[in-house]
């Protein structure tokens, strides 16, 4: 079939060929259409800042090795200012205008829950690097055909509670003969199932729950809360905090609350937390999926050190997961041979990827945590780290522990 090339088309073609030749001279040869990943995150928040940085780092590494089947991975970032409404606008723009193939979004459960229906409406695979609410995977389980585009790239609240209890059993019950606890959690979507998990697993490991305090994330004065906890005389405070962290930690130290804190404290995962709290963090025990000194897999330390070299600090927990997720999306595109959304979902479901936090596989359609990370030995178990002398030190599980428990002098803990 003969083609009549118009002068304009010929001009476009010559410009395109010239640009391609120029591109070849300047960078590795990439196929015309990049694999575009939108990253919607809390760029100003302690735990969220690492998300776009880590995603960019992964993309640069993949591109330096020639991309995915010759296609460049391109990250398009959006600061959601920790707002669900801003996140929804960013998601719509990412898909409709910026033509992204997949989205990595947010460490805030409320944000991810607001985006989940949009992932389904706009048929765009989405992975969260840090939200924990069980509701995210429940929606996929309850209405799979509609919500199959959402993946949970971090532990669910139920799995987080198990991880905290597994660590508390070895470190506190077996190690320090502790017998009682008070649960202290911020009032948020992700802590409802977390606290249900705590109430279920703490008694099973031998810690009697004496009280359960839920406080508004807007709380600035924790004095009455700590006074109430001290009056109950528990051996440990089990925490579920993310939006707050600096404030209660500073006041815990200033008031010399003689009870250790162990649990989820998202802000404590960031290596700036020691400085942010003026070292009030010393003694705080927090659950993580990775840490600056922990070789969970051979990929953990090179990533953490590379991130620090590039950005000046170690990543928060959501940095590790965001980094892994760019690789997982790229791997899914490679295996699917396509950026078609349904084919990508199918490939993501078959993920078996050794990342920085362990071996990543997703629960299937029949499991109640559909598209959540599988929890357990040989997969993802999480870690317990403790702030000691301004540094984050892994203390559990034994296989990767770099130190033993060490508390400031105001904490009263009997040794084993």
Image (cartoon, grey):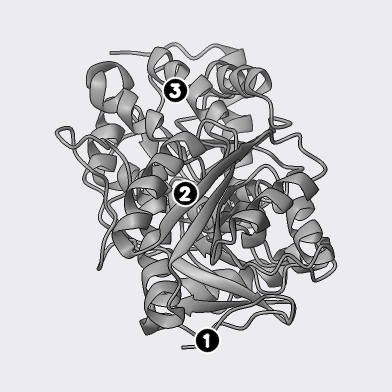
Q: Nearer the viewer, mark 1 or mark 2?
A: 1
Q: Residues within 10 Å of mark 1 (few under 14, many from 20)?
A: some
**Contact, mark 1 vs mark 3 (Cβ under 8 Å):** no
Nearer the N terminus, badge 1 or badge 3?
3
Q: Nearer the viewer, mark 3 or mark 2?
A: 3
What label does residue 194 carry, if any? Answer: none
| Nearer to us in this view, 215 or 309 | 215
- The residue identified by callout 1 is 404
Where is residue 224 drawn, in percent x and y?
76, 45
- The residue identified by callout 3 is 116
Q: Residues within 10 Å of mark 3 (few under 14, many from 20)?
A: many
Determine the image quadrant of residue 185.
top right
At x 80% / y 71%, what residue is drawn? 279
Nearer the N terminus, badge 1 or badge 2?
2
| In the image, residue 314 above or below residue 94 | below
Where is residue 155 drawn, in percent x and y?
40, 49
Is residue 224 shown left or right of residue 353? right
What label does residue 326 carry, if any? Answer: 2
Q: How many marks?
A: 3
| In the image, residue 26 above or below residue 72 | below
Q: Secondary structure at mark 1?
A: loop
Determine the image quadrant of residue 356.
bottom left
Is residue 341 shown left or right of residue 75? left
Q: Residues within 10 Å of mark 2 (few under 14, many from 20)?
A: many
At x 48% / y 71%, what residue is drawn? 300
């Amino acid at each position: 079939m003969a083609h009549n090339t118009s002068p304009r088309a010929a001009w476009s073609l010559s410009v395109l060929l010239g640009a391609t030749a120029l591109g070849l001279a300047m960078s590795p040869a990439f196929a015309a259409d990049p694999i575009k990943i939108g990253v919607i995150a809390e760029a100003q928040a302690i735990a969220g800042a690492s998300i776009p940085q880590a995603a960019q780092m992964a993309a640069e590494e993949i591109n330096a090795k020639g991309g995915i089947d010759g296609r460049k991975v391109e990250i398009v970032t959006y600061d959601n200012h920790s707002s669900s409404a801003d996140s929804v606008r960013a998601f719509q723009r990412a898909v409709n205008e910026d033509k992204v193939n997949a989205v990595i979004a947010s460490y805030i459960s409320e944000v991810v829950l607001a985006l989940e229906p949009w992932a389904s409406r706009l048929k765009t695979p989405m992975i969260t690097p840090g939200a924990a609410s069980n509701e995210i995977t429940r929606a996929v389980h309850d209405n799979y055909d509609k919500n199959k585009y959402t993946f949970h790239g971090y532990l669910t609240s139920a799995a987080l509670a198990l991880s905290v209890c597994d660590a508390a059993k070895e470190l506190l019950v077996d190690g320090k003969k502790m017998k009682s606890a008070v649960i202290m959690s911020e009032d948020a979507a992700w802590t409802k199932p977390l606290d249900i998990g705590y109430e279920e697993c703490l008694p099973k490991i031998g810690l009697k729950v004496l009280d359960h305090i839920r406080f508004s994330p807007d709380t600035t004065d924790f004095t009455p809360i700590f006074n109430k906890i001290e009056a109950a005389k528990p051996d440990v405070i089990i925490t579920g905090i993310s939006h707050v962290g600096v404030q209660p930690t500073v006041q815990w130290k200033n008031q010399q609350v003689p009870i250790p804190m162990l649990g989820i404290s998202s802000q404590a995962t960031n290596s700036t937390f020691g400085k942010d709290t003026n070292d009030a963090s010393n003694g705080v025990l927090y659950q993580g999926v990775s840490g600056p000194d922990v070789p969970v897999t051979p990929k953990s330390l090179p990533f953490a050190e590379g991130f620090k070299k590039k950005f000046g600090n170690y990543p928060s927990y959501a940095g590790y997961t965001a980094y892994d997720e760019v690789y997982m999306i790229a791997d899914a595109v490679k295996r699917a041979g396509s950026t078609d959304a349904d084919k990508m979902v199918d490939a993501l479901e078959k993920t078996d990827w050794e990342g920085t936090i362990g071996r990543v596989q997703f629960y299937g359609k029949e499991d109640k945590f559909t598209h959540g990370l599988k929890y357990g030995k040989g997969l993802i178990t999480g870690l317990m780290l403790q702030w000691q002398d301004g540094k984050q030190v892994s203390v559990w599980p034994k296989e990767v522990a770099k130190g033993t428990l060490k508390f400031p002098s105001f904490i009263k803990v009997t040794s084993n």
